[in-house]
Amino acid sequence: MTSTATRPRGARARAAIAAKTLRTDRWWFAPLITVVGLTAWVAYATVRVYMHKWYWVEEFHYLTPFYSPCITDRCVEGSAHFGTILPDWWIIPEAAFTLPFLLLFRLTCYYYRKAYYRSFWLSPPACAVPDGHQTYSGETRFPLLGQNLHRYFFYAAVIISLINSWDAVLAFHSPQGFGFGLGNLILIANVVMLWAYTISCHSCRHIIGGRLKHFSKHPLRYRAWNGVSWLNVRHMQLAWITLGTLALTDFYVMAVAAEWFPDLRFIN
């Protein structure tokens, strides 16, 4: 029996390779696109959150998800569906209670972990490419220990999705009565995508069927688990799609509120 530490007699020595990787494809392209995409979205969202204006269209009851629920004394009349309980201080976002949980839900998401680990931290940037760090400790140290709280942030994300759904329903009832326009379509599409992303989460999949020993004894939960599993395969695509729908919804509400162009109305 030959020891793995000893080269067998007559065996050729392993070739010394100076290159960090032998990959000749554009392995760096995916991490680069991720950096550009996430940086652009965070920059846009940060600017919009601290603009403190153009988030509510009184005529059609459109409220951008970046400001929902509006809970500061700065909220314009009609936009605070749950009351104003925080002071008017510029550093406090209008949606101060929901934005931190949304951020934490996405930061601890399994897909987003892979995305920013590979792109921003180069840990590792791609398969068969060396890690950008000298040591590796995984998620065993602070602050990465907090990644294990993802399952709890999921419950907060469900509540926030319910609030966004309520906002979309209220948008059909303007001061003039029932109405329907392009803004309603955008709000509904955003809510549908947010729900798809939220329930496609691995935590949701585990809650529905993770502890079952016999699916045959729980046919309804098994059917639900299959549906969530189908969405779970598309979790990465839904993560990016919802970033796009959130930005699009916010931009449309901002544009209508700022009177850059009118809302396209179909009914009333």
Image (cartoon, rainbow, N blue to C red):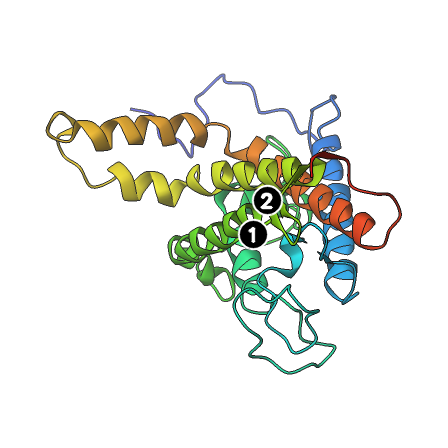
How many numbered discs, if any?
A: 2
* Closest to the observer, 144 or 175: 175
Task: Name the mark on residue 90.
Answer: none
Identity of the amino acid at label 2? Answer: Phe
Vertical comparison of 119 with 22: above or below: below
Farthest left residue in view: 217
Tell me what residue is drawn at x 48 percent, y 36 percent: 196
Q: Residue under circle 1?
A: 167
Q: Is residue 136 visible?
A: no
* Closest to the observer, 27 or 187: 187
Sequence-wise, the earlier of marks 1 and 2 is 1
Identity of the amino acid at label 1? Answer: Asp
Instruction: From the viewer's perspective, tell me whether residue 259 is left or right of residue 234.
Output: right
Few, some or many C-alpha atoms within 10 Å of disc 2 (few <14, some 14-19, many ≥20)? Answer: some
Tell me what residue is drawn at x 21 percent, y 30 percent: 220
Q: Residue 237 at x, y = what percent? A: 58, 31
Instruction: From the viewer's perspective, tell me whether residue 258 is left or right of residue 195.
Output: right
Tell me what residue is drawn at x 69 percent, y 81 percent: 88
Vertical comparison of 69 with 195: above or below: below
Quadrant of the rendered structure where residue 252 is? top right
Vertical comparison of 161 with 101: above or below: above
Q: Residue under circle 2?
A: 172
Farthest right residue in view: 260
* Closest to the observer, 146 or 202: 202
- In front of the other: label 1 or label 2? 2
Disc 1, disc 2: CB below 8 Å?
A: no
Few, some or many C-alpha atoms within 10 Å of disc 1 (few <14, some 14-19, many ≥20)? Answer: many
Q: CA distance from mark 1 to mark 2?
A: 9 Å
Considering the numbered disc 1 on the image, is that residue within a helix, a strand or a loop?
helix
Considering the numbered disc 2 on the image, is that residue within a helix, a strand or a loop?
loop
